[in-house]
Image (tube, rainbow, N blue to C red):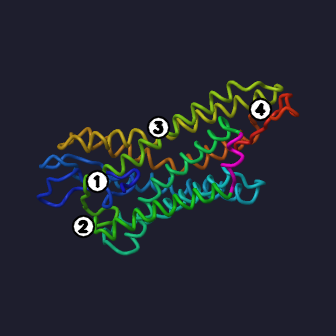
Amino acid sequence: MEARGAGPPSPPAGNSGPPPWGRGAQPGGATEAMSANGTCARPHPTWVENVDRTYTGALLVLGLLLNGLALWVLCCRMRPWTETRVYMVNLAAADLCLLCALPFFLHSLKDTTDTVSCQLSQGIYLANRYLSIGLITAIAVDRYVAVRHPLCARGLRSPRQAAAVCAALWVLVGSSLVLRWALGVQEGGFCFRNPARQSAGTTLFSLLGFYPPLAVLGFCSLQVVAALAERPASGPHQAQATRRATRMVWANLAVFVLCFLPFHVVLTVYAAAGRPTPALCYALYVTGKLSDANCCLDAIGYYFVAKEFQEATLLASVPVAKAHRTQDSLSVTLA
Protein backbone atom coordinates (compact mmCIF):
# COMPACT_ATOMS: atom_id res chain seq x y z
CA MET A 1 0.00 0.00 0.00
CA GLU A 2 1.15 3.46 -0.70
CA ALA A 3 0.82 6.35 1.70
CA ARG A 4 -1.70 9.04 1.01
CA GLY A 5 0.02 12.31 0.36
CA ALA A 6 3.46 10.74 0.39
CA GLY A 7 6.35 11.61 -1.84
CA PRO A 8 8.51 8.87 -3.37
CA PRO A 9 11.63 8.16 -1.31
CA SER A 10 15.02 7.64 -2.84
CA PRO A 11 15.87 4.00 -3.60
CA PRO A 12 18.99 2.29 -2.33
CA ALA A 13 22.08 2.75 -4.44
CA GLY A 14 22.09 0.68 -7.57
CA ASN A 15 18.34 0.03 -7.57
CA SER A 16 16.96 0.36 -11.07
CA GLY A 17 13.69 -1.41 -10.38
CA PRO A 18 10.16 0.00 -10.11
CA PRO A 19 9.64 3.57 -8.94
CA PRO A 20 10.31 3.92 -5.20
CA TRP A 21 7.01 4.39 -3.44
CA GLY A 22 5.25 3.26 -0.35
CA ARG A 23 6.40 2.33 3.05
CA GLY A 24 9.32 4.69 3.27
CA ALA A 25 7.19 7.62 2.15
CA GLN A 26 6.03 10.31 4.50
CA PRO A 27 2.78 12.26 4.63
CA GLY A 28 3.13 15.16 2.31
CA GLY A 29 6.78 14.39 1.65
CA ALA A 30 9.54 16.95 1.26
CA THR A 31 10.36 18.81 -1.91
CA GLU A 32 11.49 16.40 -4.59
CA ALA A 33 14.36 16.88 -7.04
CA MET A 34 16.04 14.77 -9.66
CA SER A 35 18.90 12.53 -8.61
CA ALA A 36 21.75 11.49 -10.85
CA ASN A 37 20.05 8.24 -11.85
CA GLY A 38 16.77 9.92 -12.79
CA THR A 39 14.73 9.13 -9.70
CA CYS A 40 13.24 11.60 -7.24
CA ALA A 41 15.83 12.57 -4.63
CA ARG A 42 14.91 14.50 -1.47
CA PRO A 43 16.91 17.49 -0.37
CA HIS A 44 15.51 19.01 2.79
CA PRO A 45 15.98 22.79 2.80
CA THR A 46 14.97 24.45 6.03
CA TRP A 47 12.06 26.37 4.54
CA VAL A 48 10.55 23.15 3.16
CA GLU A 49 10.68 21.48 6.56
CA ASN A 50 9.15 24.59 8.13
CA VAL A 51 6.30 24.43 5.63
CA ASP A 52 5.91 20.72 6.37
CA ARG A 53 5.70 21.38 10.11
CA THR A 54 3.22 24.22 9.72
CA TYR A 55 0.97 22.38 7.29
CA THR A 56 1.05 19.09 9.16
CA GLY A 57 0.48 20.80 12.51
CA ALA A 58 -2.50 22.75 11.15
CA LEU A 59 -3.88 19.58 9.57
CA LEU A 60 -3.51 17.74 12.87
CA VAL A 61 -5.25 20.38 14.98
CA LEU A 62 -8.06 21.05 12.51
CA GLY A 63 -8.57 17.37 11.75
CA LEU A 64 -8.77 16.36 15.41
CA LEU A 65 -11.30 19.10 16.12
CA LEU A 66 -13.49 18.40 13.08
CA ASN A 67 -13.45 14.62 13.28
CA GLY A 68 -13.84 14.67 17.05
CA LEU A 69 -16.84 16.97 16.69
CA ALA A 70 -18.25 14.77 13.93
CA LEU A 71 -17.95 11.66 16.11
CA TRP A 72 -19.63 13.42 19.04
CA VAL A 73 -22.52 14.63 16.88
CA LEU A 74 -22.95 11.30 15.09
CA CYS A 75 -22.73 9.17 18.23
CA CYS A 76 -24.42 11.38 20.82
CA ARG A 77 -26.67 13.91 19.09
CA MET A 78 -28.26 12.04 16.18
CA ARG A 79 -31.02 9.48 16.42
CA PRO A 80 -31.67 6.82 15.24
CA TRP A 81 -28.75 4.82 13.94
CA THR A 82 -28.93 4.64 10.13
CA GLU A 83 -26.77 3.01 7.49
CA THR A 84 -25.05 6.24 6.47
CA ARG A 85 -24.49 7.18 10.09
CA VAL A 86 -22.66 3.89 10.68
CA TYR A 87 -20.46 4.51 7.65
CA MET A 88 -19.68 8.08 8.68
CA VAL A 89 -18.71 7.08 12.21
CA ASN A 90 -16.24 4.61 10.75
CA LEU A 91 -14.97 7.20 8.27
CA ALA A 92 -14.33 9.70 11.06
CA ALA A 93 -12.57 6.99 13.07
CA ALA A 94 -10.38 6.10 10.08
CA ASP A 95 -9.42 9.74 9.59
CA LEU A 96 -8.57 10.02 13.27
CA CYS A 97 -6.24 7.04 12.85
CA LEU A 98 -4.37 8.92 10.14
CA LEU A 99 -4.21 12.04 12.29
CA CYS A 100 -2.75 10.04 15.18
CA ALA A 101 0.18 9.14 12.92
CA LEU A 102 1.00 12.76 12.09
CA PRO A 103 2.86 13.53 15.36
CA PHE A 104 5.30 10.75 14.45
CA PHE A 105 5.87 12.43 11.10
CA LEU A 106 6.63 15.71 12.86
CA HIS A 107 9.09 13.85 15.08
CA SER A 108 10.66 12.18 12.04
CA LEU A 109 11.69 15.60 10.72
CA LYS A 110 14.32 15.54 13.47
CA ASP A 111 14.86 11.84 14.13
CA THR A 112 14.76 9.23 11.34
CA THR A 113 15.30 6.24 13.64
CA ASP A 114 13.28 3.25 12.42
CA THR A 115 11.56 2.44 15.73
CA VAL A 116 8.64 0.08 16.34
CA SER A 117 6.33 2.98 17.22
CA CYS A 118 7.29 4.76 14.01
CA GLN A 119 6.66 1.62 11.98
CA LEU A 120 3.27 1.18 13.64
CA SER A 121 2.24 4.77 13.01
CA GLN A 122 3.39 4.54 9.39
CA GLY A 123 1.31 1.40 8.97
CA ILE A 124 -1.77 3.13 10.39
CA TYR A 125 -1.15 6.05 8.05
CA LEU A 126 -0.88 3.80 5.00
CA ALA A 127 -3.99 1.78 5.84
CA ASN A 128 -6.14 4.88 6.21
CA ARG A 129 -6.06 5.79 2.54
CA TYR A 130 -7.79 2.68 1.27
CA LEU A 131 -10.09 2.47 4.23
CA SER A 132 -11.33 6.01 3.62
CA ILE A 133 -11.80 5.40 -0.09
CA GLY A 134 -13.63 2.15 0.64
CA LEU A 135 -15.98 3.76 3.16
CA ILE A 136 -16.75 6.70 0.86
CA THR A 137 -17.57 4.25 -1.92
CA ALA A 138 -19.75 2.18 0.42
CA ILE A 139 -21.77 5.28 1.32
CA ALA A 140 -22.34 6.00 -2.37
CA VAL A 141 -23.43 2.43 -3.10
CA ASP A 142 -25.77 2.44 -0.10
CA ARG A 143 -27.50 5.59 -1.31
CA TYR A 144 -27.70 4.30 -4.86
CA VAL A 145 -29.50 1.17 -3.66
CA ALA A 146 -31.86 3.27 -1.53
CA VAL A 147 -32.76 5.58 -4.41
CA ARG A 148 -32.81 3.35 -7.47
CA HIS A 149 -33.93 0.10 -5.87
CA PRO A 150 -36.11 1.10 -2.91
CA LEU A 151 -37.93 -2.24 -2.67
CA CYS A 152 -34.69 -4.23 -2.68
CA ALA A 153 -33.24 -1.74 -0.22
CA ARG A 154 -35.64 -2.95 2.44
CA GLY A 155 -33.78 -6.24 2.54
CA LEU A 156 -30.31 -5.02 1.63
CA ARG A 157 -29.98 -1.97 3.85
CA SER A 158 -29.79 -1.97 7.62
CA PRO A 159 -27.45 -0.50 10.24
CA ARG A 160 -26.30 -4.01 11.12
CA GLN A 161 -25.38 -4.78 7.52
CA ALA A 162 -23.60 -1.44 7.22
CA ALA A 163 -21.60 -2.32 10.34
CA ALA A 164 -20.68 -5.66 8.76
CA VAL A 165 -19.43 -3.91 5.61
CA CYS A 166 -17.35 -1.53 7.71
CA ALA A 167 -15.89 -4.40 9.72
CA ALA A 168 -14.98 -6.20 6.50
CA LEU A 169 -13.20 -3.09 5.20
CA TRP A 170 -11.23 -2.70 8.44
CA VAL A 171 -10.19 -6.36 8.30
CA LEU A 172 -9.33 -6.21 4.59
CA VAL A 173 -7.15 -3.13 4.87
CA GLY A 174 -5.54 -4.24 8.12
CA SER A 175 -4.79 -7.72 6.84
CA SER A 176 -3.23 -6.34 3.66
CA LEU A 177 -0.78 -4.38 5.79
CA VAL A 178 0.00 -7.42 7.94
CA LEU A 179 0.48 -9.47 4.78
CA ARG A 180 3.08 -7.00 3.53
CA TRP A 181 5.06 -7.48 6.72
CA ALA A 182 4.59 -11.26 6.72
CA LEU A 183 5.76 -11.67 3.12
CA GLY A 184 8.78 -9.47 3.70
CA VAL A 185 7.81 -6.89 1.10
CA GLN A 186 9.50 -4.27 3.26
CA GLU A 187 13.07 -3.72 2.14
CA GLY A 188 14.78 -0.98 4.04
CA GLY A 189 13.35 1.57 6.45
CA PHE A 190 9.65 1.69 7.07
CA CYS A 191 9.36 5.07 8.74
CA PHE A 192 8.27 8.30 7.16
CA ARG A 193 11.61 9.66 5.98
CA ASN A 194 13.69 6.53 5.56
CA PRO A 195 14.46 5.34 2.03
CA ALA A 196 12.68 2.24 0.79
CA ARG A 197 11.65 0.56 -2.39
CA GLN A 198 8.62 -1.36 -3.48
CA SER A 199 7.59 -3.89 -6.05
CA ALA A 200 5.57 -3.16 -9.17
CA GLY A 201 2.76 -5.13 -7.56
CA THR A 202 2.49 -2.58 -4.76
CA THR A 203 2.05 0.25 -7.23
CA LEU A 204 -0.55 -1.78 -9.11
CA PHE A 205 -2.38 -2.45 -5.85
CA SER A 206 -2.37 1.26 -5.09
CA LEU A 207 -3.85 2.17 -8.45
CA LEU A 208 -6.46 -0.59 -8.34
CA GLY A 209 -7.39 0.62 -4.88
CA PHE A 210 -8.43 3.96 -6.34
CA TYR A 211 -9.65 3.79 -9.94
CA PRO A 212 -12.40 1.12 -9.55
CA PRO A 213 -13.85 2.86 -6.45
CA LEU A 214 -13.75 6.16 -8.38
CA ALA A 215 -15.80 4.60 -11.18
CA VAL A 216 -18.32 3.18 -8.70
CA LEU A 217 -18.57 6.46 -6.82
CA GLY A 218 -19.09 8.44 -10.02
CA PHE A 219 -21.79 6.07 -11.29
CA CYS A 220 -23.68 5.98 -8.00
CA SER A 221 -23.51 9.76 -7.55
CA LEU A 222 -24.87 10.40 -11.04
CA GLN A 223 -27.68 7.92 -10.49
CA VAL A 224 -28.66 9.54 -7.18
CA VAL A 225 -28.65 13.01 -8.73
CA ALA A 226 -30.78 11.79 -11.64
CA ALA A 227 -33.25 10.12 -9.29
CA LEU A 228 -33.60 13.24 -7.17
CA ALA A 229 -34.22 15.31 -10.30
CA GLU A 230 -36.95 12.93 -11.47
CA ARG A 231 -38.95 12.79 -8.26
CA PRO A 232 -41.99 15.04 -7.92
CA ALA A 233 -41.86 17.67 -5.21
CA SER A 234 -44.79 17.62 -2.81
CA GLY A 235 -44.13 21.16 -1.64
CA PRO A 236 -41.68 24.07 -1.61
CA HIS A 237 -39.82 22.78 1.44
CA GLN A 238 -39.26 19.37 -0.11
CA ALA A 239 -38.13 20.90 -3.40
CA GLN A 240 -35.62 23.05 -1.56
CA ALA A 241 -34.34 20.09 0.45
CA THR A 242 -33.93 18.09 -2.76
CA ARG A 243 -31.90 20.86 -4.36
CA ARG A 244 -29.66 21.08 -1.32
CA ALA A 245 -29.18 17.32 -1.30
CA THR A 246 -28.27 17.36 -4.98
CA ARG A 247 -25.71 20.09 -4.44
CA MET A 248 -24.16 18.15 -1.59
CA VAL A 249 -23.83 15.01 -3.75
CA TRP A 250 -21.96 17.04 -6.34
CA ALA A 251 -19.83 18.67 -3.65
CA ASN A 252 -18.99 15.29 -2.13
CA LEU A 253 -17.94 13.88 -5.50
CA ALA A 254 -15.91 17.00 -6.27
CA VAL A 255 -14.01 16.81 -2.97
CA PHE A 256 -13.16 13.15 -3.57
CA VAL A 257 -11.92 13.85 -7.10
CA LEU A 258 -10.02 16.97 -6.06
CA CYS A 259 -8.22 15.24 -3.20
CA PHE A 260 -7.40 11.87 -4.72
CA LEU A 261 -7.49 12.01 -8.52
CA PRO A 262 -4.50 14.35 -9.09
CA PHE A 263 -2.31 12.26 -6.81
CA HIS A 264 -3.18 8.98 -8.54
CA VAL A 265 -2.86 10.45 -12.03
CA VAL A 266 0.64 11.64 -11.16
CA LEU A 267 1.40 8.27 -9.57
CA THR A 268 0.28 6.54 -12.78
CA VAL A 269 2.54 8.72 -14.90
CA TYR A 270 5.37 8.31 -12.40
CA ALA A 271 5.06 4.52 -12.49
CA ALA A 272 5.17 4.49 -16.29
CA ALA A 273 7.86 7.13 -16.76
CA GLY A 274 10.93 5.13 -15.77
CA ARG A 275 12.99 8.32 -15.45
CA PRO A 276 10.65 10.98 -14.03
CA THR A 277 11.25 14.65 -14.73
CA PRO A 278 11.77 17.30 -12.02
CA ALA A 279 8.29 18.63 -12.79
CA LEU A 280 6.82 15.19 -12.09
CA CYS A 281 8.68 14.97 -8.80
CA TYR A 282 7.31 18.32 -7.68
CA ALA A 283 3.83 17.29 -8.83
CA LEU A 284 4.03 14.26 -6.53
CA TYR A 285 4.80 16.56 -3.62
CA VAL A 286 1.99 19.04 -4.33
CA THR A 287 -0.71 16.46 -5.05
CA GLY A 288 0.38 14.49 -1.99
CA LYS A 289 -0.19 17.53 0.18
CA LEU A 290 -3.59 18.01 -1.41
CA SER A 291 -4.66 14.43 -0.72
CA ASP A 292 -3.78 14.79 2.97
CA ALA A 293 -6.47 17.45 3.35
CA ASN A 294 -9.18 14.86 2.76
CA CYS A 295 -9.13 13.81 6.41
CA CYS A 296 -10.45 17.28 7.30
CA LEU A 297 -12.85 17.66 4.39
CA ASP A 298 -14.52 14.32 5.15
CA ALA A 299 -15.69 15.59 8.53
CA ILE A 300 -17.21 18.71 7.00
CA GLY A 301 -18.68 17.22 3.86
CA TYR A 302 -20.27 14.06 5.18
CA TYR A 303 -21.83 15.73 8.19
CA PHE A 304 -23.68 18.17 5.97
CA VAL A 305 -24.48 15.50 3.40
CA ALA A 306 -26.17 13.48 6.14
CA LYS A 307 -28.02 16.55 7.38
CA GLU A 308 -29.38 17.41 3.94
CA PHE A 309 -30.37 13.84 3.12
CA GLN A 310 -32.24 13.53 6.37
CA GLU A 311 -34.46 16.33 5.08
CA ALA A 312 -34.69 15.11 1.49
CA THR A 313 -36.70 11.92 1.04
CA LEU A 314 -37.35 10.03 -2.13
CA LEU A 315 -41.03 9.64 -3.04
CA ALA A 316 -41.56 6.76 -5.42
CA SER A 317 -44.80 5.47 -6.85
CA VAL A 318 -44.75 1.75 -6.17
CA PRO A 319 -47.31 -0.61 -7.71
CA VAL A 320 -48.35 -3.20 -5.15
CA ALA A 321 -51.04 -5.85 -4.87
CA LYS A 322 -54.47 -5.23 -6.37
CA ALA A 323 -55.81 -4.24 -2.99
CA HIS A 324 -53.37 -1.32 -3.12
CA ARG A 325 -53.62 -0.19 -6.74
CA THR A 326 -53.60 3.41 -5.71
CA GLN A 327 -50.15 4.93 -5.79
CA ASP A 328 -48.37 4.73 -2.48
CA SER A 329 -45.66 7.13 -1.44
CA LEU A 330 -42.48 5.41 -0.41
CA SER A 331 -40.23 7.64 1.66
CA VAL A 332 -36.63 6.54 1.77
CA THR A 333 -34.33 8.40 4.12
CA LEU A 334 -30.86 8.38 2.68
CA ALA A 335 -28.98 9.23 5.83
User: Which numbered dot is residue 316?
Assistant: none
Q: Amino acid at mark 1?
A: Gly
Percent x, y of residue 303: 66, 47
Nearer to us: label 2 or label 3: 3
Nearer to us: label 1 or label 2: 1
Q: Earlier in the sequence, mark 3 or mark 4?
A: 3
Residue at label 4?
A: 318
Position of the N terminus by quadrant: bottom left
Percent x, y of residue 214: 47, 40
Relative placement, left or right, of 47 versus 130 is: left
Percent x, y of residue 256: 50, 41
Q: Residue at x 22, y 49 (%)?
A: 40
Q: Is residue 231 magenta?
A: no
Relative placement, left or right, of 267 versus 327 is: left
Residue at label 1?
A: 201
Residue at label 2?
A: 188
Mark 1–mark 4 distance (CA, rounded to whole Å): 48 Å
Q: Is residue 154 magenta?
A: yes
Relative placement, left or right, of 165 versus 276 is: right
Please tell me in which quadrant of the rendered image residue 15 appears: bottom left
Residue at label 3?
A: 215
Q: Earlier in the sequence, mark 1 or mark 4?
A: 1
Residues drawn in magenta: 151-159
Mark 2–mark 3 distance (CA, rounded to whole Å): 35 Å
Q: Earlier in the sequence, mark 2 or mark 3?
A: 2
